[in-house]
Image (cartoon, coloured by chain):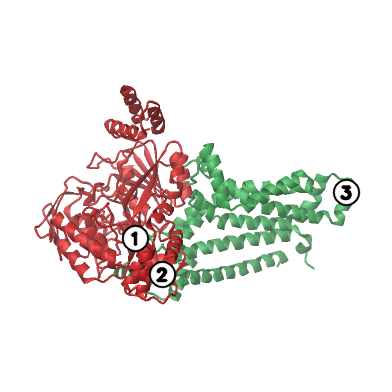
Chain colours: A green, B red
Amino acid sequence: MHPILKLVAQRLALSTMLLFAASVLIFAGTTILPGDVAQQILGQAATPENLANLRAELGLNEPALSRYFSWLGGVMQGDLGTALTNGRDIAESLGSRLGNTLFLAFWAAVISVPLAIFLGLLAVRYKDRWPDKLISGVTLTTISIPEFMIGYILIYWVSIKWGLFSSVAIINDSMSLGEKLNAIAIPVMVLTLVVLAHMMRMTRAAILNVMQSAYIETAELKGLGMLKIIRKHAFPNAVAPIVNVVMINLAYLVVGVVVVEVVFAYPGMGQYLVDHVAKRDVPVVQACGLIFAAVYIGLNLIADIVSILANPRLRHPK
Amino acid sequence: MNDQLKHLSERVSKGLMTRREFVGRAAALGVTAAVANSMLATAAKAAGPVKGGTIRMGIQGGESTNSLDPALAASMVPTVNLRNFGDCLVNVAPDGSIENRIAESVEASADAKTWNFKIRKGVEFHNGKSLTPDDVMRTMERHSNEDATSGALGIMQGIESMKVDGDIFSVSLTTPNADLPYLLADYHLQIQPDGGFDNPASGIGSGAYMIEVDEPGVRHLFKKNPNYWDDSIGHADEIEVLALNDSTARTAALQSGQVHIIDRVEPKIAQLLARAPNVEVKNVSGPGHYVFIMHCDTAPFDNVDLRMALKLAINREDMVDKILRGYGSLGNDFPINKAYPLFDETIPQRSYDPEMAAELYKKSGHDGSPIVMQVADGAFPGAVDAAALFQQSAQAAGIPLEIKREPNDGYWSEIWNVQPFCASYWSGRPVQDQMYTTAYLSTADWNDTRFFNDAFDALLNSAKAELDNAKRKEIYRDMAMILRDEGGLICPMFNDSIEGISTNVGGWIEDPNLNIMNAMAGVKCWLTA
C-alpha cells in the first residue's frame, strides 16, 4: 500500500473511533443535565400527571443505556429518528438547517480566506511599515470585540441607518439567490471580521518564518523581487500551517456561529442544537453533535493530508 | 384650524402621512399630543380597516422544538400561531367580558354547575369539513383526558361530564363554577376536527388564517381563510410570524421596517425606541407579576412574622422605578390587580417599613443566619438586579438576605416550586378564581408558596358558586386580605407588557389579557400603507 494511502486509512479509522467517543460523551452530557425532556417541554405548566403521561409517551422510562443503543442502531441504518419534542423527522429538519449553515459558512469562507491570505502577504511585503501596522491593528481590533457586539454595530449602521441590508437573516426556499445574499450580507461581514485576524496573522508569521531560511537569502542574492520571492519560494513552504489555521476557522464557521445565528435569527444548526439542548431532546442533540464532530474531524483530516502533500519530507518517507 | 387638522388626520389614516409628522404639525397648530392622538384614533376608526398586505411580527419565545399541537403550546410564538389558525369556544374580550366565538350563546344553570354552549352553524375547518358540536366535545375530551399532556389539563379537572344535544354542547361540573367560560377561553383549547385526536399537530383549525409554512423556531406563514365566518377580523392577506428571541434583533427588525409588530420591548430601551421614526411603543398594564415566593411550610418561612418582616423589607417603589423603569405598578402581596374584574381598590397598599420589619424580624426569633434566596434572570427579566435591591432594603431592616444566582437553564424544574425561597413570574389569569385555584388553593397543582389555609379554601369554594358579583367581590376581598397577611407571596410589582409597532399598523387596541393583544394582534390589526 502506498504510504500516503495507509496514512489516510489510519486517520479515517481513528476518526471513526473519535466519532463514537463523541456520541457517548454527548449522550452522557445530556443525560446528567438537570431535568428531562418531559419536564422541559411542559415547563412551568408541568403537573405530576401530565409529566408522567409525557414520559411514558416518549419512552423516557427505559434505561439510558438501551435508549442510547437503540438510537445508535438507527443511525447505523441512516435513520436519525424523530425529535422527542415535536415529533418531526430529524434528518429532514437537520438537512435544511445544515444546508443553511453551510450556505453561510461558504460565503464567509469565500470572502475571508482569500482576503486573509492576501492581507497576510501584504503585511509581510510591508513588514513593520504602516500597511502592516494598519492591517494588524484593524484585524486585532475586530477579533477582540465580541461577535455579538460587531453584529449589533453593523446592524445599527448598515441596516437601520443606511438601510442597505436586512437585519434579520431568515432565509427560506422561496427566496432567490439575490434575496438570500442580501439577507446574509451582515452576518457574513461579522464572520469575516471575526475569523480574519487569526488566518491573517498565521499567514504572516508562517511566511516570515520561512523568509529567514537560507534559501530565501539565496533567492534574494539572485536579485529576485520581494513579491516573487514570497510567491514562488516562501508561500509554498508555509502552506502547512496556513492550511491548518484555515481549516480550524472553517470548522468554526460551521460549528461555532451560534451567537451570530441568535443575533440575526439565522436558521442554522447552532440555534437548532441550542433549542434542543435546552429541551433535553437527546436524539437531536446526538445527531447535531455527531455532525459537528464529523465536520471537525473531517476538516482536520483534510488539513493533515494537504500538509503531507505539500511537504516533500512527509511525502517521501524514508 | 379644525378643518386643517381633520384633513391632516385623514391623510394619516390613508397612509399618506406618518403619525409622528401629524403630531408635529398638530403641535405647530397649538394642539397637545394627547388631543392629536385622540383625533387620529377617531380618524382611523372612521377610515375603517384596510384589507390586504402581509403583517410581519417579530416574536420572542419560539424554539425549533415547537409543534402546532395546541396542547403543547407553552411560549409566545406557538400561542400566536394558535390564535392565527384556531378559534376557541369563547374569548376573553379586552374589557374582561366574555366574547362568543364558536359558541353563539352561553348559559349557566342557576347553581352554576351546568353550562350550555350553543355551537355556531356554518363554521368550516380549513380542510373543508363543517365544525360540529361533536368536534367541540372531542376537543375538550382530548384536553381533559387523564392521559393527556395538555397545558390545559389543570383547568379541565373540575368537569364531571360533557354531552352534545342537537347544537348544544353542555358541561356538568363537580362543583359550581361561575367562571367556567373564562377557563374554556384558554388558548390551548382551540377547536380541532375530531378534537385533534388523529393528528393534533396538523395545524388544521377553524381560524381566520391557514398555515402555509411551518418552520419551528424560524418562521410561520399564514394565508387568509377565504371561508372565515367573521368579517370583523382577519384584514391582512397574510401573517408572517418570525421567531426573534434576541431583544436587539427584534428592535432592529422593527426599526429597519422588516417587521411591523414586536413584543417584549425591554423597559430600559423603551424610551429610546419610542424616539425612533415610524415606531410607536405601547405599554399595557395587565395581570402579569414578578414575585418572590416563600414556602410557608419550610423553615424559616413557616414563621408568619418572618414572612411579614420580609414583605415589609422590600421597597416596591424602587423596584417599579429601577427594574421596570416605570413600566408597571405596585404589587400588594396578593396576585390580583385592577386588570381583574371584581378587584377591590380599597385594600390598603403595603409599603416599605424597615423599622416595623426589624421589629417583626426580632419577634420571629430567627437566629440571624443568612436567609438564602435563589434567583436567575430566567425567572423574570431583571430578577437578579431586583434581588440585589431587595437585599439592600432588607439590610437596612437588619435582615440578612443572601442571593444565590442560579442558571436559567433548568430553573423551572430545579429551583421554582422546589426550593423554599426563589424568584418567579406569573402571567396572571383572566379571572381571580382561576388565579387562586391555580396557585393558592391547598390542593392546587402549582401551589408554589405551599399555602395551606382552610379558611381561604372555603372562601374560594363559596365564591365559585356565587353568581352575585357584589357578593363575590366581597369574598375576594377577604381572600386577598388573608393571602396578603399570611401567605408566602412577596409581590412587589405588576409588569406592563411593552410592545413596539410600526406607525402604519391600524386597529391596535389595549388588551390586558396577554401580550400583543392577547396574541391576536395579527388577526385583528391591519396595515394602512
Dot 1 crowding, Cα within 10 Å, few <14, some 14–19, many 20+: many
Q: Is residue B190 left or right of residue B493?
A: left
* Residue at mark 2 to residue at mark 3: CA–CA distance: 69 Å
What residue sits right under mark 1 in the picture? B491
Residue B217 spot, x, y in % from top left: 42, 53
Out of B497 and A313, give the one closest to the viewer: B497
Relative vertical location of residue A36 with respect to residue A103 in this rendering, above or below: below
User: Seen in the image, is B308 located left or right of residue B404?
Assistant: left
Q: Amino acid at mark 1?
A: Cys
Mark toward the viewer: 2 or 1:
1
Q: Work out whether residue A305 can be spotted.
A: yes
Q: Which residue is mark 3?
A: A220
Going 74% across and 57% down the picture, which residue do you hit?
A310
Task: Specify the amino acid type for callout 3.
Answer: Glu
As drawn, the label of residue B414 is: 2
Q: CA distance from mark 2 to mark 1?
A: 22 Å
- Residue B361 location, x and y as percent? 37, 71
Q: Nearer the viewer, mark 1 or mark 3?
A: 1
Instruction: Looking at the picture, tell me which residue is in the foreground, B4 or A57.
Output: B4
Q: Position of residue B198 (x, y in %)?
A: 27, 59
Is the residue at mark 2 from the same chain as the one at mark 3?
A: no
At horizontal 68% and vertical 49% (from top left) the residue drawn is A116
Whether residue A79 is visible here, answered yes or no, is no
**Dot 3: chain letter:** A
Classed neighbour count for the residue bearing mark 2: other residues with Cα under 10 Å, few (<14), some (14–19), many (≥20) = some
Q: Amino acid at mark 2?
A: Glu
Q: Secondary structure at mark 3?
A: helix
Name the quarter where the C terminus of chain B is drawn: top left
Residue shown at 24% from the left, 55% from the top: B346
- Residue A217 as seen in the image, left or right of residue A277: right
